[in-house]
Amino acid sequence: MADSPEEIQKSIRKYLWIGALLILFTIITVALSYVELPTHSLNILVGMIVATFKAALVALIFMHLNHERPLIYKVLAFTTVFALALFMLFIFTSGDPLVFEGF
Amino acid sequence: MDIPYTVSARPDTGLYNAKIGIWLFLASEVMLFGGLFSSYIFLRVGADYHWPVHELNVTLGFINTLVLIASSVTVVMAWASLKLRRIGQFKLYMLITVLCAGVFMVNKTFEYKAKFEHYAVKLTDGTYLTGHLPEGYEIKFGEVGDLTLTVQARTSAIDADPVDYVLPFLAGGEARFKTEDGSEIELNETTFADLREKALAKAATEGKNNAAIKLVPTSPLAFKAKPGKILGYNATTMTFRDGSIATGKLTDDSMVLEVDGVDTRSVPDAEKSLAWNAGYLGDAWKKAFVENRDHHLKAFEEKYGDRRDPKKSATLQKEAFFMHLHSATPEAGHGDDHGEKKAAAGAPAEHGDAHHAHHPVVKIDKKDIAFYSNFTPKLNTYYAIYFTLTGLHGLHVVAGALVLAYFLFMDGRRLRENPEHLANRVEVGGLFWHFVDLVWIFLFPLLYLL
């Protein structure tokens, strides 16, 4: 581990700030969900962007992915690709006889 | 044998082994939850009903989000404290983390319990009434004339077993019967075995594989059972799941519901919904509904004009056509204008028994009920994926909390003798804990808000 006591000492304040930021963005997510955007799909999109940002904060700072060894990034690269493929699978339903008219 | 590289990094990977292990595990966890999130997308895109938005208790979900974020901060602080050998702080942060997990699960229990006790009744015209069943829902059957048990000589899926499938539903009267040969018995395991043996012996002489035992009650007899616990019924017979048939009279199969919501979104003309029938909610509530609906439609029209199609606004549809009832009569509640605001602060009618008295109670005819269920996976695909995702996530919370609690309470020797090893363990446990938080960051908006 490259985490020297001095660096850990410094990161403690960072952890608290990130925690505060996460709470702030949670409040923003709740508030935004009550705002009527032109379509509900847009609400979902905005909500997911905020959630992804929050998830990135957790992964990068709390899970130390901002300074990790290359091997872990290699493993996670595969995970990311396959996870995105899973999320995109629904695109194939666009040819279904059932018509999807938006949320 | 000692596991190598638990403290120091392995030269070729630059990491201690447990860290590679946890990341590989988390990678597979991403696939597990990813598959379920993918299912969520499929179910939502293919839903043929109004996908619930803001239907769960947002306040409770919000509190749980804060609790998980706080625990994520404390678990990383626990690790940092241990790295700096501040043992007291490490223990404190770890304890807070475990307590947070406890708070999360307690909240989850309240949330689940409210769902189990809350019912949705789909009427035959597509209207949904939501509410509580103060008396449960049971088919009442009385004036039992006789009870016919059909026993089988060979092993059969349906074979008379009155002790397990008939007598539990006795609701008045004693299980005393007159048999065909005129003797009087109390029906129980022993007397039934006896009856069965005699009936089958007689059937064997006639070359038959089964025999019917006819019993006539000696005193007035009644049954009551949940519809799912019996095979079926009509006006004059009730068939139990062991094939036993009672003749008599159907006393009551209507459902008493304390209504806290009327959802007319699937009805072509909301004003003609069955819910407004005289025997049900009636004209007064219909008037309140129409006022509420028109109020919301007008406000929407004023705000957006032609720019938005009211039929495409899920929020408007919900506000205008899904009325929440907060009082026993519409006058007492001043319509529903304030209802939506209350609903926004937290799902109504799920705060506890105290509120139940403030709802109209209706008696719904069986013929008007198309389907009913509590808010469980049986109701619709939303609740199916809600319970699957939050249930699996809850299991992860419990598992993570157990691991972290182990490091806190059971790993004292390692803390004294090899704190650097414990720090690595805490980091690995913490990585799992952050992952659990990360999943919730997506679950909360997807299930509660959007």
Image (cartoon, rainbow, N blue to C red):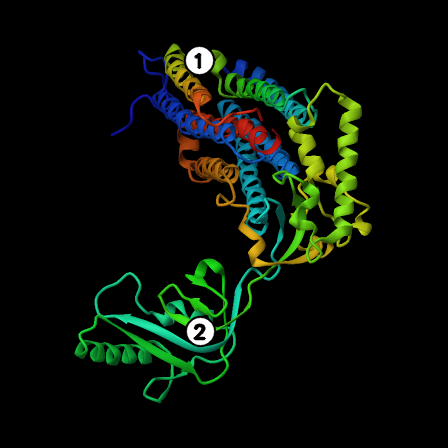
Badge 1: residue crowd in 10 Å (few <14, some 14–19, many ≥20): some
Residue B293 position in % (x across, y down): 75, 37
Most distant residue in the bottom direction: B182
**Closer to the camera in the image, B34 or B164:** B164
Give the chain letter at badge 2: B
Badge 1 marks a residue whose secondary structure is loop
**One can see residue B86 in this view:** no
Q: What residue did someone put label 1 on?
A: A68
A82 above or below B437? above
Asked if disc 2 and disc 1 are in contact, CB closer than 8 Å, the reply is no
Give the chain letter at badge 1: A
Badge 2: residue crowd in 10 Å (few <14, some 14–19, many ≥20): many
Residue drawn 33% across the image and 76% down it: B189
B54 above or below B161? above
Q: Is residue B446 left or right of residue B402?
A: right
Q: What residue did someone put label 2 on?
A: B247
Residue drawn 37% across the image and 69% down it: B244
The answer as to whether the residues below labels 2 and 1 share one chain is: no
Residue drawn 30% across the image and 67% down it: B159
